Amino acid sequence: MDENQKIYIFVTGGVLSSLGKGITSASIATLLKHSGYKVGILKIDPYINVDPGTMSPFEHGEVFVTYDGAETDLDIGHYERFLDVNFSSKNNFTTGQVYLSVIEKERKGGYLGQTIQIIPHIVDEIKRRILLAGEDVECLVVELGGTVGDIEGMPFLEAMREMKQELSMQKVISVHVTLIPLMRAAGELKTKPTQHSVQELRRIGITPQIIIARCEKPLPLELKRKLSFSCDVDMDSVIVAEDAPSIYQVPLSFVREGLLSPISRHLSLKKLEPKMESWDKLVKQILFPKDEITIAFVGKYLSLKESYKSLIEALVHSGANLDTQVNIKWCDSEDIYNNGFKMLEFVDGILVPGGFGVRGVGGKIEAIRYAREQQVPFLGICLGMQLALIEFMRNVLGVSEADSIEFNTNTPEPVIYLIEHFIDQNGKRQIRTKTSHKGGTMRLGEYECHILQGSKLQEAYKGVSIVNERHRHRYEINPAYRAQFEKAGLIVSGESNGLIEALELLGHNWFVGVQFHPEFTSRLQNPSPIITTFLQKALYFKKHKR
């Protein structure tokens, strides 16, 4: 598409973080997509890290993995879940990546001896990456991470200002998400923080065309008028975004609030009329489901639910499509290890997600043993699958020292080990050892999984023989033990380039473990087949087996 015909919508945030810029950006993009436009979306993160791959989940929440193996901000997951589109490494970049690119170019003589400065060199690199993300789309929604006024975000705002100058105000608009706090003592909503936030933007040459006002209760007409005058935006451009029971309500709320009118007016677009009937039906099934089940979620990062964001949302997607509410029972694996199975007694399914490190492993193994012995539907993801094998080797086959070298480097029975050579998704041979740089030792991104005919895994994927799923792990199942555990009934039902991708237990209601992360490809309108099947089995177990 001609660059002069493309439109760019920049989404910024003010007052404080975690206001929902990611959901706002995803919702705007969703409405444009359902109105017939080809939409792209970009998240810019202001931190110096090159990527969030080695950041603690307590620090940053979940690391989302794209199909091409990029470790990105969790908002990329929101974008994919809302838009049902596969995004790539070009849809997320950080300050660290920008500076690294500029410094590497300078070291190679690419700037011909110029003095390297924030303006123009850093800002030009930011603009180059924005334009790259906008290739092959008609509209690009750009979310600027952080909060207006943060020193690390200034180069990104400058890039936004320059793009508006270069491409005209008919091609670039600014949407500002800000807080309208409720002062409970006085019972009043306050607009002053928003006014100051907009003033900060205007100070650097950016006047937002649309304000998304986050608040706990409806914004009175007089306050909308006050924001309109004080922030120099049209009355219909002050959009109220109240707290919602489901994030998937937000696009529908924006339609009711009239957000599409100022967007189409400022960008000179035809009238936007998104077709949201299917979306609306799924949202109703999230809010008013016919059935309900309880799933034990056995993890160790339970103090920060954002660590499992994609998996939580995948359960919502599958539940919505089954017209079933999924109640998550958060089970700390260390509590299970110390206090036994009591918290698992009345659940309809047991889910053990991925993770890293030895802490909490004992409780996860005990939860898996309970699922196996009590015929409770079980799904193990990544580490959850590996622990299912360890539990089986120890408690069924009597290999008491079966372990992962992640937890015990000197184990005499390394059923989970570090494979030093593997073929990556680009067909290249990679080498990893225990001393390799942590950012480069994982199998990342999308790989083919060849499914065993007649298996439960194939049933879940509706008879398909090959699927593509995403990975984020470092250790693999040791094939030296395969004949031993398969003979005992734990069979390999999925493989990828000789690596074991899936296990399932014969004679069990539903006991499946997968090395990949199916939650990364789950979307509201296209849920993960294996997670959906797991919930179906849990619903059946609740109704017929208990």
Image (tube, rainbow, N blue to C red):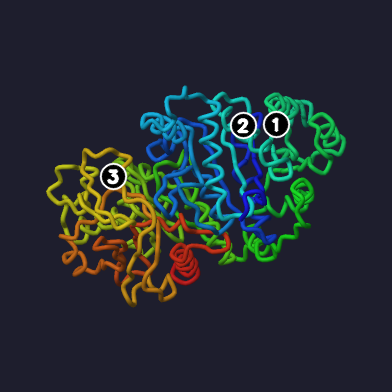
Name the kind of residue labelled 2 in the image.
Leu
Amino acid marked by disc 3: Thr
Point out residue 194 in the picture as x, y percentages from the top left corner: 73, 30
Mark 1 or 2, nearer chain start: 2
* Residue 362 against residue 189 in the figure, above or below: below
- Spatial separation of the CA atoms under disc 1 and disc 2: 8 Å
Residue drawn at (83%, 39%) of the image:
234
Q: Which mark is residue 273?
A: none
- The crowding category of the residue bearing disc 3, from other C-alpha atoms within 10 Å (few below 14, some 14 to 19, many at least 20), is many
Q: Quadrant of the N terminus?
A: bottom right
For marks 3 and 2 on the same chain, the one whose residue lies earlier in the sequence: 2
Mark-to-mark CA distance, 1 and 3: 43 Å
Which residue is label 2 attached to?
A: 157
Residue appearing at x 36%, y 57% in the figure: 516
User: Is mark 1 in CB contact (under 8 Å) with mark 2?
Assistant: yes
The residue at which mark 1 appears reads as 206
One can see residue 365 in this view? yes
Q: Position of residue 487 (x, y in %)?
A: 19, 70
- Left or right, residue 446 beside residue 321: left
Q: Disc 1 residue type? A: Ile
Out of 205 and 513, give the one closest to the viewer. 205
